[in-house]
Image: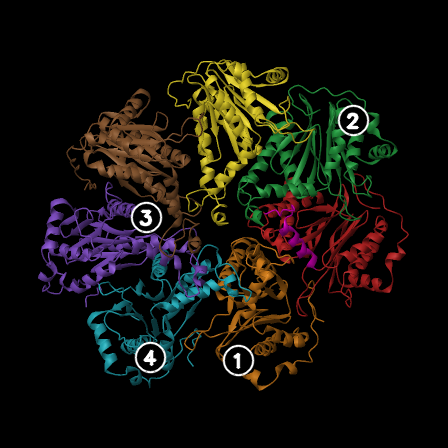
Chain colours: A yellow, B green, C red, D orange, E cyan, F purple, G brown
Amino acid sequence: MFRNQYDNDISTWSPQGRLHQIEYALEAVKQGSASVGLRSNTHVVLLALKRSSGELASHQQKLFRIDNHMGIAIAGLVSDARVLSNFMRTECMKSKMMYDRPMPGSRLVSLIGDKAQANTQNYGRRPYGVGLLVGSYDEDTGPHLYECLPNANCLEYFAVSIGAKSQSAKTYLEKFAKDFGDIDVDALILHGLHALRETLQQDKELNLKNCSIGVVGKDHDWEIIEGDRLKAYLDQLESGSSSTSTGGAAAEELPQGEAMDTE
Amino acid sequence: MFRNQYDNDISTWSPQGRLHQIEYALEAVKQGSASVGLRSNTHVVLLALKRSSGELASHQQKLFRIDNHMGIAIAGLVSDARVLSNFMRTECMKSKMMYDRPMPGSRLVSLIGDKAQANTQNYGRRPYGVGLLVGSYDEDTGPHLYECLPNANCLEYFAVSIGAKSQSAKTYLEKFAKDFGDIDVDALILHGLHALRETLQQDKELNLKNCSIGVVGKDHDWEIIEGDRLKAYLDQLESGSSSTSTGGAAAEELPQGEAMDTE
Amino acid sequence: MFRNQYDNDISTWSPQGRLHQIEYALEAVKQGSASVGLRSNTHVVLLALKRSSGELASHQQKLFRIDNHMGIAIAGLVSDARVLSNFMRTECMKSKMMYDRPMPGSRLVSLIGDKAQANTQNYGRRPYGVGLLVGSYDEDTGPHLYECLPNANCLEYFAVSIGAKSQSAKTYLEKFAKDFGDIDVDALILHGLHALRETLQQDKELNLKNCSIGVVGKDHDWEIIEGDRLKAYLDQLESGSSSTSTGGAAAEELPQGEAMDTE
Amino acid sequence: MFRNQYDNDISTWSPQGRLHQIEYALEAVKQGSASVGLRSNTHVVLLALKRSSGELASHQQKLFRIDNHMGIAIAGLVSDARVLSNFMRTECMKSKMMYDRPMPGSRLVSLIGDKAQANTQNYGRRPYGVGLLVGSYDEDTGPHLYECLPNANCLEYFAVSIGAKSQSAKTYLEKFAKDFGDIDVDALILHGLHALRETLQQDKELNLKNCSIGVVGKDHDWEIIEGDRLKAYLDQLESGSSSTSTGGAAAEELPQGEAMDTE
Amino acid sequence: MFRNQYDNDISTWSPQGRLHQIEYALEAVKQGSASVGLRSNTHVVLLALKRSSGELASHQQKLFRIDNHMGIAIAGLVSDARVLSNFMRTECMKSKMMYDRPMPGSRLVSLIGDKAQANTQNYGRRPYGVGLLVGSYDEDTGPHLYECLPNANCLEYFAVSIGAKSQSAKTYLEKFAKDFGDIDVDALILHGLHALRETLQQDKELNLKNCSIGVVGKDHDWEIIEGDRLKAYLDQLESGSSSTSTGGAAAEELPQGEAMDTE
Amino acid sequence: MFRNQYDNDISTWSPQGRLHQIEYALEAVKQGSASVGLRSNTHVVLLALKRSSGELASHQQKLFRIDNHMGIAIAGLVSDARVLSNFMRTECMKSKMMYDRPMPGSRLVSLIGDKAQANTQNYGRRPYGVGLLVGSYDEDTGPHLYECLPNANCLEYFAVSIGAKSQSAKTYLEKFAKDFGDIDVDALILHGLHALRETLQQDKELNLKNCSIGVVGKDHDWEIIEGDRLKAYLDQLESGSSSTSTGGAAAEELPQGEAMDTE
Amino acid sequence: MFRNQYDNDISTWSPQGRLHQIEYALEAVKQGSASVGLRSNTHVVLLALKRSSGELASHQQKLFRIDNHMGIAIAGLVSDARVLSNFMRTECMKSKMMYDRPMPGSRLVSLIGDKAQANTQNYGRRPYGVGLLVGSYDEDTGPHLYECLPNANCLEYFAVSIGAKSQSAKTYLEKFAKDFGDIDVDALILHGLHALRETLQQDKELNLKNCSIGVVGKDHDWEIIEGDRLKAYLDQLESGSSSTSTGGAAAEELPQGEAMDTE
């Protein structure tokens, strides 16, 4: 009961130095269906679980194209995600027009952070209720995977998951992440599907309709994998444990200038 | 009692990561009289139940023309619907003037989503209290049926229903939706009337005054069906079960590039 | 006690999906003295009961002229009515200056609806506390009778009543409305007086001071009936039951393009 | 206790459809010292009781000149009255400059109504706490007497009183109002003094200091009566019952176009 | 307890038609050290009691020069007084520049009233917490003494006192006011000192430091009396009862056009 | 408990006519470490006790240079002091640029008062939480010492102290203030150190780090005394009672036109 | 319970003269992972503990480059830090463009203080939830180390620590600070690592991933130490107590013009 004093205004500190509204918005992300991201030295793969709004509905869109070299996967309020993805697309277009070069992923992620921070300091606004995984391939610095949360924190990852039951996916990813550096896209996708499968409820299976895959990488514009190609991956997923077969791959080389966590 | 702490401000998150005001606005849609939408490969049909404000009143308008290629059916606050339909008509006019082409349905639906999202993030506004079914026929991509709700979510459907007792209509639609792909407009309308009839209260019947039908499709500008033609459909509805007669139709072909739910 | 949580802010939804402030404003209309409207195929008649503020006061104005082809009757807050009628007069003047034609009734009613809706969505405003009956005669579409309420709903009617004890008037109107189509203005006025008389308190009678009549129709600019002519109608009202004498009139023809309730 | 929920915000309706803040502002008028207004067919007389702020103070000003053909008497918050009378003077000046004619009384009263209504609908304002009696003589339509209250209602009267114990004055006025039509100014003033005397507390008497008289009429610019002339009236008041002496005067002729209450 | 509902917002009426915040601001004036004002037919004298903030401080300034022909004495919040006196000085300067004549006292007092009224009607402001005595000598109308209070009321007086224990001073003034009309400045000052002495606490005496005198009048620009001259008055005050010696002076002539209370 | 009703809004009067938020802000000054000011006929000396934020921190700055002829000492919120001192420096610069002369101390103090008053009347602001001692030497009027408090009161003093335990310093100053008029700067500084020492806690001593001295005066630009010179004064302070040695100095002459308290 | 009255609005004083929201924001700094700063006569070293967001995440960035001659370490809300560091970088760029010289550290720190103070006085904002250590090397005045806190206080230090368990680091720093003046950068870094190690939880060790070092100084642009060089320092840290080896260094010379606490 005591904490209620401080938790209904984004611009009010609790005596413990916490901003409760930000913490509650993070809950909204945890309730979205899961998304998974992982990267090799050449590619980033984003995967998302889609919830159906009934048998006759299209599934909610969980992957959004931002630019040729960039896409996102989301968990949380879809309408907030749409607003943020529109913002990102506009910024990418501006970058091309003004500087004649694609927007670097790190720069765009920093802009999202600023936009989200403003919503945590001004009275009468609420923090966004959505988490983003941003996959980008930058000509100079290669593939990048970022997580952007309602608290305006944006971190780079080798592999990460957000949304409901994302902890199970993380456990899988932590176990196999040391293999991801040099494997090819197909193996990376299979790892991603394994991780995503961990977030399913007991009696559910991945199928053509509840799962989306997005890929971006070296000489590989952002692409969403559907239909036969998606089916092929799902068949492979059922037939065996792709992860163990690639388990012996060499540890990736850390790219220069990035402090990634690979232990 | 506990939840009351968080439910009277649109810009306040509950500790569970929910925005209660949005959920309450969705209730307003559930209390409106039902609307039904369904589509074949060539047409979209929207149907709505009209409530009378007494014997001497005209019935409330439940179907609105947006453009030659587009119309909507509503459930919820009529005055909010009028504001939104004015907005949609203006956007369609702008599209014609600036780009010399009809507004694509998906684009308009996305604009409505943005407009509705703004009402869920800014203090001192309330979410709209109306749900929309949008039927459009786009020259390039054919017929589309969308549902737009107060939570700013906009989904595409093959068949859908909103408003009071809409679950009964959905049950009917899910049962017969596999037949809708290739049937002609008349059969589609009869399916729609069957679904709409499910939302009636025990002792009520569909008649010329409490029911509206709107159609848009290939070479078929938005049209509201009234009078003798409407009577013909109602007579047919009473005389037999049109749904079983079309039950054997082949499953529709999914249009390219759309992930519709047809199982 | 529970509902009090949600009823003092126009922009707050109750958990049941209701906006209590709108419902309370509708109460203000129900407490105003009654107004009655009814129409034939050629004319619209508005009648209103005037409350005196004491013996030495003029009665409150209940009928307002909007334009040559349009007038209104009100129930509820007179000061809100004055603001709205000023708005309507200005819009009619604009229509004449800009388009050189009288404002169509349906268009003006739609503008009022938009104006009223804005007051139901923005924090710090209150819904208007007045209901309007709008009678207009449009050159192209003939006579129209509209009801505009604080919830921003505007419906067309053949006959309607608002304000205190308006239900009694409605009961009368529903009984005789089938006769109104082809009767002349005098018969229409007598029906209106009968209906208005139903809203009087037990021991009150209609007289020259507590009752106003406004008429608009084909070749008949908005006119308020007073003095000898009003007395003639009141005398007729007392001398016999005009309603029964016209009871056998043929059912009116529904004008094309309007879905009026005449059963 | 229950009603307190709704009575501290001007823009909040009570469940009974009332705006409590307006009703409370009307209380402020009832607590002001009384003012009386009455009119013949040629003149309007305003009278006011002045409260002293102690023996050494001038009495509060209760009558204000607006223009040559117009003056007001007030009851309630003097500071609000000053703001409103400044507004009225400015509007009269504008009328002269822009249209080269005096502001008609009915037009000015309508402007005050609009100004007062705005204060009853916008959050963060309060209704004015003053009632006005407006007396004007218009070249075309003769003398007029209006009452303007905090609820933005403005009514025309033959005779009226506002403020503390004004009911006693009204009782007097209703008894003799039928005589006022054709009597001369002096008789009208004496009736006014009789009515004003009714509002005095038990042991008080009208005297040169606690009573103000203003007159406007045909060929009679707004004038405040003081000194010897005032004393003459007061002497007459004491010496006899002027009201009975004029009791047999013929009932006034109602001016054309006005629905005054004279029964 | 009940009244607390209505007393913390300047723009909220209590059910009794009162604005509590204004009444509380009047309390602030009553707690300030007293000021006294009185006038003859040629001069206005203002006197104020100064509270020391300790032995080493200058006393608070209680008298302010506004213009050559005008000065004020205050009781209440000194910082509010400074803001108001700056406003008054600016208005006087404007008058000289724009109209080439001194600001009439009555006009300036009316401006202060408007400024104070605005603070009693707008949400988020507070009424000023200071009372002013304004003394002015106008070329045309002679000496004037006004009292301006936080409720925006401004009254003219022959003699008045505000602040702590001002009732005692008023009692003195009422007793001797009939003498003030024709006496000279010195006698007027002595009367003022007598009145001011009544507001002292039991064991206090007027001295050079706790008492200020300001004078303005015919051929007498605003002047603050200090040092030897002040001492002379204080000596005279102690040596005898100046008031009785002037007790037989003739009652003053009331200036034309002003309704002063002198009974 | 009762007073809590009125103490959390700067623009709300308590029923006793008090503004609690101002009183609470004065508490913030009382909790700051003490500052002392005193003046002779030629100089002003400001002294301040500095609190350390730990052994490794510089001490908080308690003295600020405003201009060549002016400096301040503070007690209370340092960040508020910085904002105010920036404001003062800017005003001094403006004075030089626009009028080509140094800002008079009395003028600047009046500007601070206005700035502080605005914070006590407008909703959504808080009063400053800092007290200032302002020392200035004006070419025309000599040395001046002012105290400016959060209640927007600005008083001139011969000697004064603000902050924690300032009452002890005041007691010292009142005892010896009669000597300050004609003594030289060194004697004035020693008196100031004696007064400041009174505000120390039991077992603390003045030393090079916890004490600041600022001087301004005739032919003496604002200077902060440090290092050896400061040490010399501290040594003198310990070696004897400087105050008694100067105790016999003649009482100062009060400068013309200023009402200082010197009894 | 009592204090809750005053702690949820930044612009409300408690009766004790405290602003609770500022104190709560300081709590947010205390909960961030620790940062340490220390300086010699030629260099400033900043060190920070990085918390991991899981094994696959990059660590949160705790050190930010501001300019060639300046960098910061943070503790608290990372998103607030990003906003402030963007502000600092922009100000440094402005300084170069407008004045063609690097921004002095003291000037920038003062700008941050002003920016933070504004957030403590205006309603509807919250204080920043981050503390900064600012290290700068100014050509004229040499190395500087500042601490900037949410209460808008900015102090200069020889050595300081903020964040969780920073008191342990401060204890170490106070013990050895007397040695820091003349030691070389490597020794200074080792002292910093010793201090930072004190803030670790029981069973944690400094390693390549959880620790960042930033250096700026004479002829030494801002540099972040990583990889092999960082490993060398960590190895040294484990192998012996660097602090004791430098324990005999001479006490530093206090730079002129700065009052640092070195006892």
Check disc 2 and report its element: helix, strand or loop.
helix
Residues marked 2 and 3 touching at CB (< 8 Å): no
Q: Does the magenta stretch include residue B48?
A: no
Q: Which amino acid lies under the numbered mark 3 shown in the image of this protein?
A: Asp
Which region of the structure is painted magenta?
A: C12-32
The Cα atoms of the two marked residues, 2 and 3, are separated by: 74 Å
Chain containing the residue with disc 4: E
Pick the residue in front: G131 or C70: G131
Q: Mark 4 points at which residue?
A: E182
On the picture, is C199 further left or further right than G23? Answer: right
Residue C64: image quadrant is bottom right
In the picture of the structure, the residue carrying the numbered disc 3 is: F80
Rounded to the nearest whole Å, what is the CA distance between mark 1 and mark 4? 30 Å
Left or right position of A19 against E145: right
Q: Which of G43 and E242 is in front in this view?
A: G43
Q: Are marks 2 and 1 in contact (CB under 8 Å)?
A: no
Q: Mark 2 points at which residue?
A: B185
Q: Do labels 2 and 1 share a chain?
A: no
Q: What element carries label 4?
A: loop
Nearer the camera: disc 2 or disc 1: 2
Q: What's the residue type where badge 4 is placed? A: Asp
Chain bearing tag 1 is D
Report the disc number at residue D206.
Answer: 1
Q: How crowded is mark 4: few (under 14 residues within 10 Å), some or many (20 or more)?
A: some
Subunit under mark 3? F
Residue type, numbered disc 1? Leu
